[in-house]
Each structure stands twice: as structure tokens, then as C-alpha cells.
Amino acid sequence: MIELLSDKELWNWWSPAWLVVVCVVMLYSRCIGWVTVQKTAWLIAGLSIFVFAFVSPLGVLADGFLFSAHMIQHLLLLLVVPLCLVLSLPRNPAWQSGNTFTFKTGILGVLRKTVGFLVSSPKLGWLLGLGTMWFWHVPSLCSAATESQLLGFARTASFLVAGILFWWPIYAPSKAARMPASNAVVYLFSACLGCTLLGIYITFTAITVCPAFASPEERLAIMTALHDAGMTAPVDQQLGGLLMWVPPCSLYVAAIMSVFCRWYSVEDRGAVDLSVSGATEAGR
Amino acid sequence: MSESDLPSSAESAPGKAALGNLLDWISTVDHKKIGILYICTAVFFLGLGGLEALLIRVQLLFPNNDFLSADLFNQMFTMHGTTMVFLVGMPVLVGFQNYFVPLMIGARDVAFPRLNAMSYWLLPFGGILLYFSFMTGQAPDAGWFSYAPLSTKPYNLMPGQDYWIIGLICLGIGSVAASINIFVTVLQCRAPGMSLQRVPLFVWMSLMTAILTILALPALNSALAMLLIDRLLGAAFFEPARGGSAVLWQHYFWVFGHPEVYILILPAFGMISEVIPVFSRKPIYGYAFVAGSSAVIVLLSYGVWAHHMFAVGLGMGADMFFAVGTLLIALPTGLKIFNWTATMWGGAIRLTTAMMFAVAFLLEFVIGGLTGVMFAAVPIDWQLTDTYFVVGHFHYVLIGGTVFGLFSATYYWFPKMTGRMLSERLGKWQLWLWVFGLNATFLSQHVLGVMGMPRRVYTYADNPGWMALNAFAGAGAVAMAGGTLVMLLNIWVSVRKGEEAGDNPWEGFTLEWATSSPPPAENFAVIPEVASRRPVWDLDHPEVADAEREPTPADTGWRPDKLVTSAWAFVASEAVFFLLLLVAYVVFNTDVAGEIVSAAMLDVPRTAFFSVALLGSSFTLWRAERLLNSGHHAKFRLWLGLTIVLGGFFICGQAVEYYGLISSDVTIDDNLFTATFFTVTGFHGLHVIIGLLALAIVLVLALRNDRNVLGGTTLKAIGLYWHFVDVVWVAVFCIIYLGFLQ
């Protein structure tokens, strides 16, 4: 198995992911700038994981061979990479202080406002964050996106955008854009519930969620080894469902812990209004 | 209020007052009296549950004993488990919460005093239903978790099982109502200055427990409803022979059952988090961690239920993930032990009985916790499952944890409740009897479990060492019974002749010590200013006040609306109920490949037409709310009336559909599709009817110009429920009629 892993076919060195990385780095240095080592580290982490998700054997296996690999890729792109990207934004970047920064064209300014409005809506963030998970696992869509490269791109883009919108109300660089702690807890807990339901469904259902993976047109050498080790299509799907269920929930719980830390700290003003929002959240 | 204004403590002691004015106790809505009622009822059932435990021990005293028949033995362990969990553990904890949460947050009462009384009275009602089963010839005997198919009709013909189900539904409804009450009380009734970051940890744990109960109990209720439908109406949800799934029962039961463990332990965590700091003369070490980690426990507890099912054969993948989850949840629980230990570290410890029980809690709970972590390793679980090792493990958690926490709290708070101190000497007797009893009984059971003695089997062969260990376990049980009698004697004597306690005998830190003992009906004459987590300490020691030394996030003064918050909590609970019913629908109708299902049997366009009416009613209610807010009362009544008409129209539609189906001989016991269809739509219809009744009451009140309706948030709260019922219908329609997820 170790020999097979080192097989070159398992590494996709010419993935277009690199192109995206170059674009993001250029955009970041142009619009945001290199502020602190910590922020840069988050950016590097996010982009490295992004590249890993496509270039490594994970990316190759996710491309129509292993449902569980697809699921890991899915989670990295929807949850981990966007989280790193959001955390890589500095507290007061040039483009947030408005007046001091002007783009050459006004169009971008309008765009910024619109995006800002959309991004700051927790309901939209929640719906998109959860919606993309569910949407791309409708059997026909899941197969189609795996088989068609164009749809695959669209799916990746939707993961990244939805992921950023999802994390924004929790970790937005400016404190004003963040939700009150109690709402944030409900937001994350309900998201956990959402992915739990989908995870349970994928784990236990008799339906093949992504037919493209159950009967792939071609097989990599490693697939035989995996199959012999017990990784049949149903096991693969069960593993995928469990991946959809447990790791995201663990991530959400970790985020909830960070929200609690924020809430209990006296310095943080946002923390002080918890009791205010307590009620709104109360029943949610 | 001066001392002389207060009733003397002897007069208001529960025993005498109860005799003096029985009606007063029966009709009370005072949270303190209801708290005492809860506790007394729980003690009564503790007697019954304890007696059952003793009978079990007597039966197991010798190999091949026939003191109890196999049948009776099954009934005994079933009733013992059910009683201890539902009629002792939960009620006694709710009783303490009832009594002390309002006092600790500086409130006059709970948010909904009458609902509180209803919640309490459902407890004896449920308890009587459960115990009435003995009169029917056979008490329930399928274990406290009533695994299917043992609990289904073919294997369990006697009505005892039905009483078990109905009793538990009663108790479940009461628990959810009580929890909604506590939840709203903590959020809404806090004294000025008491931000949620400053509430005493017992209050915080009560809040967490309430959330757990609100979201976990409906899982049990939905499973119970399905089991009852199986048994009474002939459906086959849990009968594998007819296509049902016995494993589904296990899933549903443990989705409730695992959070239930935390429902029983979190309040005890809260209790010792009050006791240890007071008797160590220090604030709790790491308040934020203790509180925050409990919230994490709440979240994680819903994700580890399948570790009770490792032996079922869920597949290696599932076992692995649940094993990891189980290890994870041990972290926030286990780390708290360090918080409590660190609180004692360097403190001026006073080893009162309350404190000694708290220390015993730490020691014994660690044993129960560690054996629990052992079960996270799947192979160990496979080896030990269904042996006495498991019994030993969870009794260490529930006795070493919950019961010791409760005893600690009893000695700590008894002076507040009665104005008299409990005898410390008798307290120490009780402590050592229980410590000996717990370890004698359940340590032996650990050994017996490893030796392979199966649980729930009425007798055993004369294997080497088994009889000695069982006899030792029996001696432990007798010691625990003796300890309980000592406690009752202590209470009996102390209520009458105990030393006068005064307002704050322990120099406690939290608000309940700022009022008289026992507290007056309105709790506080003046509520002290709250500026920290230890307001009474601040008052007594202004020179080293926490408010100065350890600033905490201040209170903004904002409080949520009572009715709307309670409506949200109720809706959340109901959502879980419907979610699980819908999951059952999807589970049972996926394999069938949709042949007999929806398309053939149901008139989708007709139902769609009626559905539009229901969805329309959401719109009309929204209009009504807006008109009410803008003061157009006449138009508001009109739109409200229209809402009722549309809702009624929908119900008529459902009646037509049911009539059509039933007259063409399609009934709930036909197959799994009809069973799930009638269950889901039936419960939804029931909710619509309840909503219609509520709206009709609101309309009548509005026509009488009732100020609460016209000026308050009543309509908003009921509206929330109504919109929820509509949202559920959208899900029902998509899944059942349009075939989503199949």
C-alpha cells in the first residue's frame, strides 16, 4: 500500500488550485496587505490546505474514486479553508475604514457594499453554510458535479463563498459585524444539528448518495488495495456520512468554546451584551 | 424585613405546615413549597425504588436462589431503574432547582408559577400510573430502557408495559414543562446586576440541564408514542418480524438516554460547585471553565448516544467515531475535577458533612467516570457489556455523583429551607454508611462483571467467589439503606429540635443567604446589589469585594419576554419530537422503493390545496399581529378569525383524507408506510387542533378586550407556535407527499 501511495498518479501537481492560490495572494497583498505574522500564518494555512485538498492523493481520490475522500475535501473547502481565510483578515483592513481607501472605480465600491450587506447577515450565512452541504449531496447533483469539471468548479466556488459567509458572523475581523455570543452559540449548535442530520442520513440510508463513487468508470491501483482492506462502496459511504457528521460538529463545538471565551472576558464589549441577546436566542 | 415579621422557623417547617394546612400545600404555586413537594415525593419513591433494590440483592444473595421468580426479578430491576431515574433522580433535582434557582438569582418566584404546579402534579400522576401496573398482574419487565422487540406486544402481552409508556409520557411532559420554566426563569427573572456571566454555578447548571431536558425528552416521547401505537393500534415500528426496526428503538432511546445521564449529573455538579467554594472560603477556581465546559457537555451529549450500542453492530466506522466522541466528552467532565480540587487547594477547609459529601463525590465520581471512559474502547465494551461491570460503573456515577451531590446539597441548604441545622453527628454516620455501602456493593459488581456475571439474570450458578462477592454487595446495599434511614431520622429530629440556623450559617456567598431562613413567601424584602459572582460575600466583606478585585461582564439590564421565550423553548422541544417522527418515516419508507407509497395512496393535489390554506393562515396571523401592534383592534380580530377559519379548513381537509383512506381499508396497522403516515400526520393534526384552540381562546379574549391579549405578547407567543406548526407541515408535505429524501 505504501508503494501505491507513492505512485505519481496519486499526486496532481498540475492542479488549477495553484492558479487560485496565486490570485488570492496577489489580491491579499494588494487589498489587505501583510499586517501581522499571525494573519499571514492563517492565510498560509488556508491556502496550504486548499492546495492539499486538490494536489494531494486526497484530491485525486476525491475526484470520482472515493466518497469519503470527497467528503474530507468537501469539509476542508467548506469549513476549514474559509475559516482560515476569514481569520487571516486584519481587524481594521484598509478597505473597511471606508474613507481612507478608495478603489479606482466606483463599481468596486458598490460591489463592496453589497457584499458587505450580504456577508453580515447571519441568516444568509447559516442557510448557505448548511444549504451547500445538503444541496451538493442530492444524489444526481453529487454525481454530476463529480463527473463534470465545470460543475466541479462551481461546487468548489460555492463551498468557499458559503464557507466565508458562514464564518463571517462569528469571526468577522470587525467586532461590530460579529453576532452576540448567545446567538453565535445557537447559530453554531443548530449548524451542528444540520450537518448531524445529513451525516446520519448518509451513514444509515440504503440509498447511494453519490452514484458516481459507487461505480466509478475507472479505478486507481490503490482502490483495489483499499477494497481488499474492506473499503467497499457501502463502507465508503458510511465513512463519508460519519465524516460529514462528527468532524464538523467538533469544529463547531470548538468555535462555541472560543465564543464562550470571548463572552466571559471582561475586556470584550461584545461579551457584555450577552444577556441582551440571551432572549432572542432563548427560544431559537 | 425584621426577624419578628417572619414566621418562626418551627412553624413553617415542612412537616408541621403540611399537617397544619394540607389544602395550602395542594393548591400552592409558591416555588419553595413546590420544590419541597418535589423533594418529598422523590423521597417517597426513593423508598419504593430502594425496596426493589433490596429485594434484588436478597435474590442474588445465594446461587440458584428462588426468593424471587425470574418474572418478578425482571419486574424488580425494571421498576427499580425506572423509579430511580424518573421518579427519584429527576424530581429531586428539579425540586432543588425549584427551591433555589429563584432565590439564587434574586427572583420572587419562577417565571410561570402555575405551570410549575402543573409540572409537579404530573409527577405523582405519572408515578401512580407506573405503580398501578402492579395491580394489573404484572409490572413492566423489559428493563428501564424497554428494548424492542421485548417491549412489543408479541413478547409482552400484559398491560404493565402500557402503563410504563403512559406513565413515562406523563413524566416527560411534566419534566419538559418544568424545564421550560427554569429556562425562562434564569433568563428573565434575574435580579438587576446579575448578568448571565455572574449567576451561581448551580443556576448555570440548572439552565444547561433545562436545555438538555427540553431537547432530549421529546426523543423519548416520540419513541414512546410509536411504541404505544405499536402496542395498542397494531403498528410495527419496532417489530422486526413485520419489517420494523428494533435498533431504531435503541437509537431513539439513547438519543434521549445519554443526555439523560447529564440531566442527572449536571445539577449535582452545580451543587458541589456551590458547596466546595463556601467550605474552602475561596471563589470557585475557573468559573468560566466550569460553566463553559458544561455548555460543551450539553452539545456533545447529543452526539455520543451510540456508545450504548457498540454491541449492536453498527459497523466499524460508526463505532470508531462514537468511541472518539465518547473520549472527547470525558474531557470537559474530567477537567472539572481539577477545578474543584484547585478550589480546595490552599483554602481554609471546613469539613462539615456537606463538604465531606462533596469530597466523597470527587473521589467516587472519578471511579465512575474512569470506568466510563474504559467503555469508550469498543473491544472492552464488547467484553463487558451486559455484565455487572456496567451496573457497577453507572451506579458509581449516579450514586457517587448525583446522590452524593444531593446529600451534600441537603446538608448545605437544609438550614435555609427550614431554619434549623441538621445534626452533623448523624450526618457523618450517614456519610460513612453510604461510602461503605457504595463501594461494597458496586466495587464487588465490577469484579463480578469482569468474572462474567451477566446482569438482568435472576440467579447464577455457584461459581467460585460469586456468592461471596454478591453477599458483600448485599451488605453494602443494607448499609446504604441504613444511611438513608439515618438521614430521614436526622431530618425528622432536626426539623423539630435542630439548632437554629440564622440567615447565613455557613457564611455562604450567593443570594439565597441574603434572606431569612426559611425565606418569606416573597423571598426577599430587599434584593442586595449584585456586582459580582458572590454578592453576599461582597456585602459581608466590602474591603475585599469581588466586584472590585475580579470584575465580571456587567449586566445590561435587558431581559427577554417571558411568553415569547417560553414559546421558543416549547417550539424547539416540539421540533425534536417531529424531527424524530419524520426520521422514522424516512427510515421506513426508503427501502420500499416508493411503490405502494405516497403516489398511489395519497391525493397529492388535494392535500396541496388544503396545505395552501394552512400556509395562508400563517400569513393571516402575521397580518393580525401587525394590525394588533399598530392598534387596529377590529381588523386584528377579523384577521385572527380568518386564521382560525383557514386552519379549520385544513383540518377538515385532513379529516376528508383520513375518511377516504380508512373507508378504503387503509389503516395504521397495514404496513410501515401507513403506520408512519398516520403517526406523522396525526400528530401534526393534533398540534393544529391545539393551535386552533389556543387561537380561539385568544380571539374570545380579544373580543372581551382583554388587556393581556391586546397589550401583551400573548399573540406573538402563540403565533410562534402556529408558524412552527406550518413549517412542520411544509417538511411533512415535502417528505411524505412529494417523496423527498426517499
Image: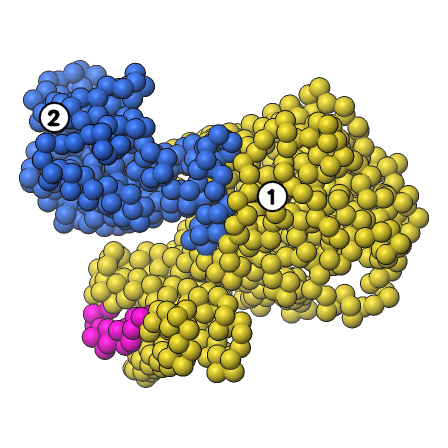
Chain colours: A blue, B yellow
Q: Amino acid at mark 2?
A: Cys
Asked whether residue B654 appears in the rendered view, the answer is: no
Chain of residue at mark 1: B
Measured from the top left, where is residue A238 in percent x and y? 29, 40
Q: Is residue B607 magenta?
A: yes
Secondary structure character of the magenta stretch overall: helix
Magenta stretch: give its range. B598-619
Q: Residues within 10 Å of mark 1 (few under 14, many from 20)?
A: many
Find numbered disc 2 in the image and state the secondary structure of the residue it sits on. helix
Q: Amino acid at mark 1?
A: Met
Residue A54 placement (x, y as % from top left): 15, 27
Residue B463, placed above or below residue B154 = above
Q: Position of residue B266 (x, y in %)?
A: 59, 41
**Residue tagged 1:** B194
Task: Identify the residue at horizontal 57%, vertical 33% (top origin).
Answer: B552
| Residue for point 63% across, 57% down | B110
Image position of B309 (left or right of B372): left
- Note whether B319 is above or below B219 in the view shown: above
Judge left or right: residue B500 versus residue A268.
right
Q: Which residue is mark 2?
A: A23
* 1 and 2 marks on the same chain: no
Q: Quadrant of residue A166?
A: top left
Q: Quadrant of the C terminus of chain B?
A: bottom left
Q: Where residue B737 sits in the image (x, y, percent)?
A: 25, 67
Q: Nearer the viewer, residue B520 or B430?
A: B520
Residue at the outermost right position = B497
SS for callout 1 = loop
Choose between A231 and B660: the one closer to the eye. Answer: B660
**Looking at the image, is B730 positioned above or below residue B329?**
below
